[in-house]
Amino acid sequence: MTKYFTHYRTNEEWEDEQKFSEPEGVLNHACSKKFRYMGISKGDWIFIVTILKGKLFLGGKIVVDRICKNRTEAQKIFGCDVDKLSDRNNNQEHLIGESTELGMCSIHVALDMIKELRFFKIEKGRPVITSKLLKLVFEKDKYGSDTDKLDRQTLRGLSGLRQLTEESALLLNNLLEEGYKLSNQNNTTLNNKVVEANQPEQDPPWVRDELILILNLYFQHSQDNLTQNHPKIIEVSEILNSLSIHPESSDQATLRSPGDIYMQLRNFQRFELNDEQSELKSSNSLEEKIWIELSVNKENLNNLAKLIITSGYLNSPQVNVVDEEEEFPEGKIAYREHRRRERNRKLVKKAKQARKSRDGYLRCEVCNFDFHKAYGDVGEDYIECHHTKPVSQLKPHDKTTIRDLALVCANCHRMLHRKRPWLHPLELKEIIRQVQSSSHQ
Ligand SMILES: [Zn+2]
Ligand SMILES: [Zn+2]
């Protein structure tokens, strides 16, 4: 199983590396005394980090290829001289990464993300896997509360190494990919540059309903054969994404991935292992509380899970507020899926912006109604989006694009949804034309 670590570089090492790394220099080497001691092996990920003036910076990722026990061995592989390997006393292990094209970068990690990072505890000199995870430590102000500056020592760990959870590693990895994407767009190299990458949107915290469904899955299947793409895990992921538990999230169709479900199953497994060693004393997280409450009563758990699935479908807030007519010609679930896609906030914004910069105004594609013209400032920038793909052709993991969205007024949108199968905007436009021409005769 892949393990994930941060490797701390001192500010001097960091600055040297930024200064001297040529554009073609790649990040594939690190020195420490404890790589093997920490159990690091081929395939593990090492994130290079430093803390400068209380801020966390990410320098890149090394995927471990091998660990050499000393400088001589490393030199044979690199075929270069001693000084470049910055191990003056010849007493360190040398970690060599898989081949890569990527060099050092310097990406500022935002405070929100720092607070999400979780590390394993070191006990008796080794990292141990327990349900107690550690956060990074901040400097205190004079009243003893956290400032927004990180403590300089917090990432030093054992010889610069700390082990972090898979979730935390994926956060850093996303950030890194954003950073590299950004530098490709600007056609610049990341070397010697501090990049403020868009911090990827955080998933909303897990709620009770979601965790109950996952715990129920945990007890219904042996953990041995559950992999990330097991059909049961995919099924639970699809159920969770269809329940509209987090209407505020911009892309609900992919909110809880099979990987997320898998991670939660592993969390529950940790509680079970700890239970056996009776180490689980205090309950902190919601996961722990639900474990303590329901792992001892599997019948209640199963009933709750069934209730959530059935009533969740019927009581979706989005279905109830939208339509007084209570007519869902395509079925409630299909209707909700359709509405979810056309309400994707990011996409709606993008579609409106694209149209406005093309035409200079927003008008209903069916009847030409212009909210700004009719209502003045109140109506400025208002228009609704309608997803034009037939519901029967929607697949759970299809991505909606702005080409799928028609911009229509509220009246036309209602009419589009009124009959089964739903009308296409062009069909409705034709209907209006016919009605008008017949009334003029
Ligand atoms: Zn209209
Ligand atoms: Zn619609």
Image (cartoon, rainbow, N blue to C red):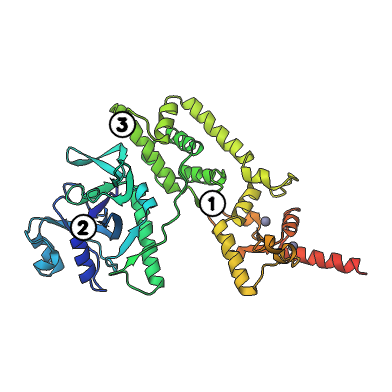
Percent across and percent down for residue 152 are 23, 51
Residue pictured at 61% horizontal, 63% vertical: 404
Report the amino acid beneath label 2.
Answer: Arg
Q: Which residue is mark 3?
A: 274
Q: Is mark 2 within 8 Å of ligand 2?
A: no
Task: Tell me the quadrant of the picture where the C terminus can be found.
Answer: bottom right
Residue pictured at 35% horizontal, 60% vertical: 176
Q: Is mark 1 within 8 Å of ligand 2?
A: no
Marks 2 and 3, how far apart at CA = 34 Å
Q: Nearer the viewer, mark 2 or mark 3?
A: 2
- Closest to the observer, 375 or 257: 375
Report the amino acid beneath label 3.
Answer: Asn
Q: Which mark is residue 9?
A: 2
Residue pictured at 66% horizontal, 57% vertical: 390
Q: Secondary structure at mark 3?
A: helix
Q: Is residue 15 left or right of residue 305?
A: left
